[in-house]
């Protein structure tokens, strides 16, 4: 810098250099923290996001239509049904349990909806509500049996998988499927779009603003309590990254038909359930049971009530997911698809960061996980790979997710974190 520069110019340059140094430091700290997380087995959402980018680039290299607005919009709609199941499974996995019946419950819920609406003339809205309540009731029954008998949840829900599967076949009868109104409420779930570009861009702006305000509020409260908190530069960097991704996604969606209503509902469900799991006392009880059940009981937590409520959430979300899965064809889910639904939903939840050992997971992790799973499914379809290999690929992804989870657990134990 020249000595002849005016003081105003020097001060301005100093401010710019200072700001650049802060954000460069934030990037450096983020890199160091990411490296440490990998060493401890906590790859987190950043690792899943990197994996997603790799998947997209690989499929784009083989088929130039993969990253087209039409295909990406289709992925955002197709992932919603299975994603709803994954959201419910996050709660069960947080307990250190597993619900094997979600695929069968999803199929049964669509049959209940179709029978009520088509055969008895119950209005669609009421029939859909009763179908969701059926899923919740099934979850309550399975959760109660598990909590009261002490039998592992996978045994109870395995019986449920078979039992609800058989009941679905019985209700379907010889036809094997039931059709409902292809112009009605449920059928429109997967075909409705908000075509005004302001809808997608507005959602991106609201999401970024809410994230920024939440982080700043958390920082203020932690500082007031004398706890470690994120630097403002780190918060701004994260908010800027989210804004870039959100507005880019909005631009892609608007390049096709606009913001899908199914995706909007999915994001709303993820927000509500994540708030319940991560911000409410109820969520802390779930994580407490998942990490140390006996200690949680001695601390006064109503173990039976919490366990039953978790399976209620899982059953209800399975029913909601079933309705979204039935929407594109305006017909009930084929019973034979329930094992695939279970595999995909479980793989999404675990791949996204929920642990089979309990006490870990967020709904946003499940969102990223199902995005990876559905991207793989879409890429396989575009490349014309045999449908039978989809089962092999799904099983491979599930196995990889479980191995990553197990490796993460061992690394955390080595660092005294588990």
Image: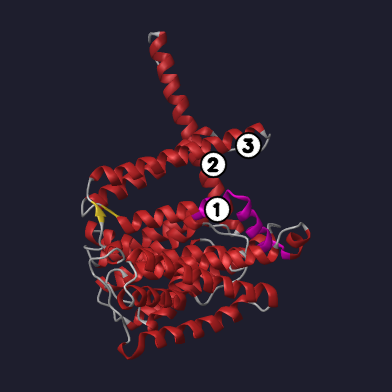
Dot placed on the residue nearer the N-terminal end, 2 or 1: 2
Image label count = 3
Q: Which mark is residue 29?
A: 2
Q: Mark 3: few, some, or many residues within 10 Å (few <14, many ≥20)?
A: some
- Name the residue nearer the viewer: 313 or 404: 313
Instruction: Please say whether residue 355 is visible from this viewpoint.
Output: no
Q: Which mark is residue 276?
A: 1
Q: Mark 1: few, some, or many residues within 10 Å (few <14, many ≥20)?
A: some
Q: Which residues are magenta?
A: 273-293
Q: Tell whether 343 sits left or right of 375.
A: right
Dot placed on the residue nearer the N-terminal end, 1 or 3: 3
Give the percent coordinates (x, y) of residue 391: 39, 80
Whether 174 is among the magenta residues is no
Residue 8 lies in quadrant: top left
Compared to residue 154, the image places residue 297 above or below, namely: above
Q: Which mark is residue 222?
A: 3
> Which is more foreground, mark 1 or mark 3?
1
């Amino acid at each position: 810098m020249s000595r002849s520069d005016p003081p105003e110019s020097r001060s301005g340059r100093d401010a710019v250099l200072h700001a650049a140094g802060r954000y460069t430091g934030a990037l450096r700290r983020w890199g160091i923290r990411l490296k440490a997380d990998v060493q401890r087995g906590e790859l987190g959402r950043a690792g899943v996001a990197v994996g997603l980018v790799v998947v997209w680039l690989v499929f784009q290299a083989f088929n130039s239509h993969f990253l087209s607005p039409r295909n990406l919009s289709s992925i955002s709609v197709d992932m919603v049904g299975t994603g709803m199941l994954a959201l419910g499974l996050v709660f069960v996995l947080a307990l250190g349990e597993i619900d094997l019946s979600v695929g069968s419950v999803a199929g049964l819920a669509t049959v209940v909806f179709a029978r009520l609406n088509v055969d008895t003339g119950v209005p669609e809205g009421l029939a859909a509500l009763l179908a969701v309540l059926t899923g919740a009731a099934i979850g309550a029954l399975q959760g109660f049996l598990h909590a009261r008998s002490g039998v592992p949840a996978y045994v109870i829900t395995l019986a449920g998988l078979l039992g609800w599967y058989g009941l679905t076949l019985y209700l379907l009868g010889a036809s094997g499927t039931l059709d409902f109104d292809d112009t009605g409420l449920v059928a429109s779930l997967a075909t409705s779009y908000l075509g005004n570009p302001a809808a997608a861009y507005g959602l991106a702006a609201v999401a970024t603003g809410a994230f920024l305000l939440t982080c700043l509020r958390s920082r203020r409260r932690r500082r007031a309590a004398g706890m470690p908190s994120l630097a403002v530069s780190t918060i701004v960097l994260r908010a800027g990254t989210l804004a870039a991704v959100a507005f880019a996604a909005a631009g892609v969606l608007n390049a096709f038909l606009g913001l899908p209503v199914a995706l909007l509902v999915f994001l709303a469900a993820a927000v509500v359930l994540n708030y319940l799991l991560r911000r409410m006392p109820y969520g802390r009880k779930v994580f407490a049971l998942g990490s140390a059940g006996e200690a949680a009981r001695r601390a006064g937590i109503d173990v039976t009530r919490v366990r039953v409520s978790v399976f209620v959430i899982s059953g209800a979300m399975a029913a909601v997911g079933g309705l979204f899965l039935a929407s594109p064809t305006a017909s009930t889910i084929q019973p034979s698809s329930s094992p695939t639904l279970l595999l995909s939903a479980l793989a999404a939840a675990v791949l996204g960061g929920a642990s089979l050992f309990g006490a870990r997971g967020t709904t946003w992790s499940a969102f990223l996980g199902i995005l990876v799973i559905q991207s793989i499914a879409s890429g396989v379809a575009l490349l014309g790979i045999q449908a039978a290999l989809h089962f092999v690929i799904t099983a491979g992804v599930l196995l990889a997710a479980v191995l990553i989870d197990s490796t993460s657990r061992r690394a955390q134990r080595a660092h005294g974190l588990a």
